[in-house]
Amino acid sequence: MRILLWLALVPVAFAGDTRFEISYPASANAGPITGRIYVMISRTNDREPRIQVGRVGIPFFGRDVEKLAPGQNAVIDQTDLGTPVASLSEIPPGEYWVQGFINVYTEFHRSDGHVVWMHDDRWEGQHWNRSPGNLYSAPRKMTVDATKGYRIQLVCDQVIPPVQVPADTALVKRFKIESQILTRFWGRPIYLGATVLLPRDYEKTNISYPVLYEQGHFSLAAPLRFDTDKDFEAQWMRDDFPRMIVVTMQHPNPYFDDSYAVNSVNVGPYGDAFMQELIPEIEKRFRVIRQPWARLLSGGSTGGWESLALQIFHPDFFGGTWSYCPDSVDFSDVEGVDIYHDKSAFYKEFEWRKVPTINSREINGQIRQTSEERNRFELVNGTHGRSGEQLDIWSAVFGPLGEDGFFDPLWDKKTGEMNSRVAQYWKEHYDLRYHLEQNWSTLGPKLEDKVRVYVGDADNFFLNNGTRKLQAWMKNTESPHYEGLFVYGAAKGHCYSGPVSSADRLKEMAEHVLAKMPPETVAGWWKQ
């Protein structure tokens, strides 16, 4: 048995034939499997190749599979798209660590009548390379030489185990609920969760507290890094520090680790689920002051957009937002792409010149990745928007529904060609600056003294550009005239959150609550 396995892992030369054959045993999954297979190739194995996959990570290649049976081979060859190396034929001859992987999809029968196969999150935050139930082979060191040809078999007999949720402590509590609203939409159980940081003497009092809803990517860690930031923990436990409740939410979905907390024809009614299920559950389980002046928002990047959007779309429910490096708040710059004027997501055209669009940069201005490279990376991760990555979730949240049940893309990921009809849909539904412009007469009075935005002027994803356009527009608002607060960090990248510590920012937020609460209210939660 050992001899047969060893032979299966030895490259075999086939002139002009360059391929990996990926299979799995019934002991790993009863099958059949519909999903996506990958091969990852790395020069090192200090971390498994599957963990080295990333936007600027190692080469990997993918292909969709349908009803793959145990023991049956699925093939990845030189015709399959890869990133950052486009084809297996372009891997230089040499010795590498190689690993196979199978991303298992689930069938969803949605309430809109569409049936789609996607990866069902297992409370890992929609990351296929570490999602429970997915299969992988043990990394193997071997010689790969496309000039001679090879056929390498990789058996994915390893199964990623379930996520281990951290144990609750005296001050950090977690819960997870099934969302009836989202379950009805997706046709399978969909879950929401929250991690709650309580004040130091919560169990010794019967008072209620202001609450900060901190938005961001999926995480089961304690809010504000309470479990790792010892300086912040020390401040939190001081007698003169404001006692508040801080909550992070978990809302992974079949497209991404975060839903953006709005209703969407592709991702589902997450806005309704937030406001009608998750927040009421938090306010039922914990002693939260159930008043707008005591509900605050913050978050960075994805969470920055989310915290700003929640304040804008629910101005009577929340009392103020501190938005850090928000995703594009004006879609004339979506990580370098002007969706309203660019003909291609890959290039800018200037008369006779055609210049690649830059997706991300280093703080010193050096190019990190072009838009074309970024799109290829997502396409190798998954077709039909199933990459679990940033561009795809924006299309899923902001875009219209396609005929196949997946989103109608804003641009073609292979050619970069833009779709102006889809761009108009994005604008009318989720361009925050445009939404404010169209609704300022009703929103303006409700948003006064509630909008604070922080971003580095060298943001790695150019998020400062959209922020400046929002600021420029707000400077000219009338009835009321409200400019908001915009703070830019000089030579600061992603994700700048201002010149103060988390502890000092909480004090600032507490001062805001004190200033907004009714005069007769007793602030027993902060004795200065």
Image (tube, rainbow, N blue to C red):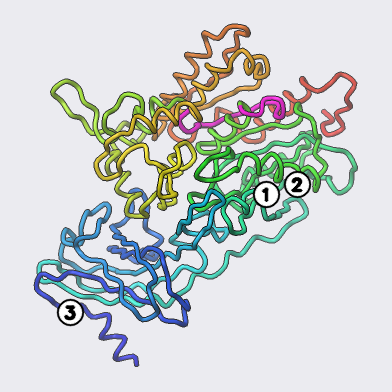
Quickly name the residue at label 3.
12
Q: Nearer the viewer, mark 2 or mark 3?
A: 2
Mark 2 surroundings: few (<14), some (14-19) or many (≥20) residues within 10 A = some
Q: Nearer the viewer, mark 2 or mark 1?
A: 2
**Local secondary structure at mark 3:** loop
Q: Is 377 situated above or below 443?
A: below
Q: Is 173 situated above or below 358?
A: below
At 29% from the left and 60% from the top, the residue drawn is 61
Residue 146 image position (x, y, % from top left): 14, 67
Mark toward the start of the polypeptide (1 vs 3): 3
- CA distance separating discs 2 and 3: 59 Å
Mark toward the start of the polypeptide (2 vs 1): 1
At 75% from the left and 47% from the top, the residue drawn is 281
Mark 1 surroundings: few (<14), some (14-19) or many (≥20) residues within 10 A = many
Please say if the residues under marks 2 and 1 sit with CB atoms less than 8 Å apart. yes
Q: Which residues are magenta?
A: 313-329
Residue 421 image position (x, y, % from top left): 37, 30
Left or right of residue 16: residue 207: right
Q: Amino acid at mark 3?
A: Val
> Based on the displayed image, in which of its 4 quarters is residue 191 positioned?
bottom right
Quickly name the residue at label 1.
194
Q: Amino acid at mark 2?
A: Glu
Q: Which mark is residue 281?
A: 2
> Based on the displayed image, in which of its 4 quarters is residue 199 positioned?
top right
Q: Amino acid at mark 1?
A: Ala
Q: Is 198 situated above or below 301?
A: below
Please say if the residues under marks 1 and 3 sit with CB atoms less than 8 Å apart. no
At 41% from the left and 81% from the top, the residue drawn is 25
**Residue 168 belongs to magenta span:** no
